[in-house]
């Protein structure tokens, strides 16, 4: 008989113990089992994460709000090690939605009870004074929101999860924006991950040459990444002049680890002439006649940045589908204000 290594057996045993304790509503045993899960996580094999992720996700609704966020983080960690993100994500997003609603209530109650600077949203800020001021659920939601952000990004790294969000993406973004406006905290990772576009058509007009291009983008988290991949498609592809990114610069913007320095080739602008900042996201590009329309002007000064991906676990793609003919390009240029 072949026995599994002791560390692996202990990890799934701890998961099973946690399942039993949660279903029997035994708080002390649940806490002990969670400690065991964390202790043996590093010893587990990838195959065990495939099992553990969905099992932990399915328990989330039955775990109290405080430790629920930690279970969410552990579920995300299992997904990062190979567990099925599409099976885990609905449970994570349920927890995120509830946390965002309660965090919004936290901000309202904080303002209504004297206001002042909000505490940082982390577990160290949670104390009796905060709970007395805003209530247990609201305080816990605020202090665990970074954990829900972490767990949600682990799900949103996967295109299959993003494809299934549909209307829920709009609801989560609306709830997040309410918290952002009330608190002035960005929760930037969650915000950017929810804004990622997939299989999104993009028309690009290179104003200096009067040429146009039809592209399609997926998994691009910010415009630094888009800018680098545009330069690869257009400059590297021999269509326009500029800095052609190296193979390594392109690779780290797609799926390779790390960052490498690069130099910008364009100034990204809207059809109306406003700058599209590299620090923003591709969702900033306006939609014209059902398609996002971006204009490339010469760069007003030399810009450099570390080429790479805002989300290291998210694969990015930008595909040049075709070069527009002169008639199509002129038609799109008619939507654009003159260069400033």
Image (cartoon, rainbow, N blue to C red):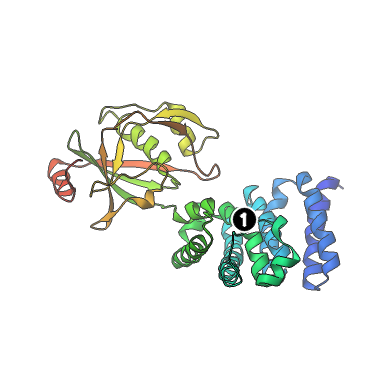
Residue with the mark numbered 1 = 146
What residue do we see at 50% from left, 66% from top?
175
Looking at the rendering, in which quadrant would you find the C terminus? Answer: top left
Position of residue 258 relative to residue 312, above or below, is above
Pick the residue in front: 236 or 129: 129
Q: Horizontal and vertical percent for residue 157?
A: 53, 50
Q: Is residue 42 above or below residue 128?
A: above
The x, y position of residue 50, in whole percent, is 67, 53
User: Residue 118, how many percent across, how many down?
Assistant: 60, 60
Identified at 43% across, 27% down, the residue is 247
145 in relation to 276, above or below: below
Q: Residues within 10 Å of mark 1 (few under 14, many from 20)?
A: some
Q: Is residue 76 visible?
A: yes
Which residue is depicted at the point 49% across and 53% down? Answer: 193
Q: In the rendered image, which quarter is residue 131 located in?
A: bottom right
- Res 3 visible: no
Look at 50% across and 38% down and name the residue there: 255
What x and y, as percent, mark residue 122? Answer: 67, 56
Whether residue 32 sits left or right of residue 175 in the image: it is right
Q: Is residue 103 left or right of residue 308?
A: right
- Count every numbered label the image shows and give the total: 1
Report the front residue among 270 and 85: 270
Residue 169 horizontal side relative to residue 302, left or right: right
Disc 1 is placed on an element classified as helix
């Amino acid at each position: 008989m072949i026995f599994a290594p002791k560390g692996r057996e202990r990890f799934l045993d701890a998961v099973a113990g946690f399942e039993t304790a949660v279903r029997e509503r035994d708080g002390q045993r649940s806490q002990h089992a969670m400690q065991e899960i964390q202790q043996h996580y590093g010893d587990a094999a990838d195959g065990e994460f495939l099992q553990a992720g969905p099992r932990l996700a399915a328990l989330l609704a039955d775990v109290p709000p405080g430790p629920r966020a930690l279970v969410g983080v552990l579920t995300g960690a299992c997904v990062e090690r190979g567990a099925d993100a599409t099976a885990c994500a609905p449970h994570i997003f349920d927890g995120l939605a509830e946390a965002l609603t309660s965090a919004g209530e936290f901000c309202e109650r904080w303002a209504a009870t004297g206001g002042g600077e909000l505490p940082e949203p982390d577990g160290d800020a949670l104390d009796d004074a905060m709970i007395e001021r805003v209530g247990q659920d609201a305080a816990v939601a605020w202090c665990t929101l970074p954990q829900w952000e972490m767990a949600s990004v682990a799900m949103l790294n996967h295109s299959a999860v993003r494809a299934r969000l549909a209307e829920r993406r709009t609801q989560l973004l609306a709830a997040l924006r309410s918290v952002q406006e009330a608190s002035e905290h960005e929760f930037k990772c969650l915000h950017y991950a929810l804004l990622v576009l997939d299989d999104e058509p993009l028309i690009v007009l290179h104003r200096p040459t009067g040429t146009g291009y039809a592209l399609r983008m997926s998994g691009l988290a910010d415009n630094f990444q888009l800018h680098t991949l545009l330069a690869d498609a257009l400059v590297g592809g021999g269509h326009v002049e500029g800095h052609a990114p190296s193979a390594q610069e392109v690779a780290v913007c797609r799926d390779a680890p790390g960052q490498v320095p690069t130099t910008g080739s364009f100034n990204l602008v809207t059809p109306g002439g406003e700058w599209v900042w590299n620090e923003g996201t591709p969702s900033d590009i306006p939609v014209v006649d059902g398609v996002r329309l971006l204009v490339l002007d010469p760069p007003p000064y030399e810009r450099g940045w570390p080429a790479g991906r805002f989300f290291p676990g998210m694969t990015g793609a930008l595909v040049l589908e075709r070069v527009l003919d002169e008639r199509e390009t002129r038609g799109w240029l008619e939507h654009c204000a003159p260069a400033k």
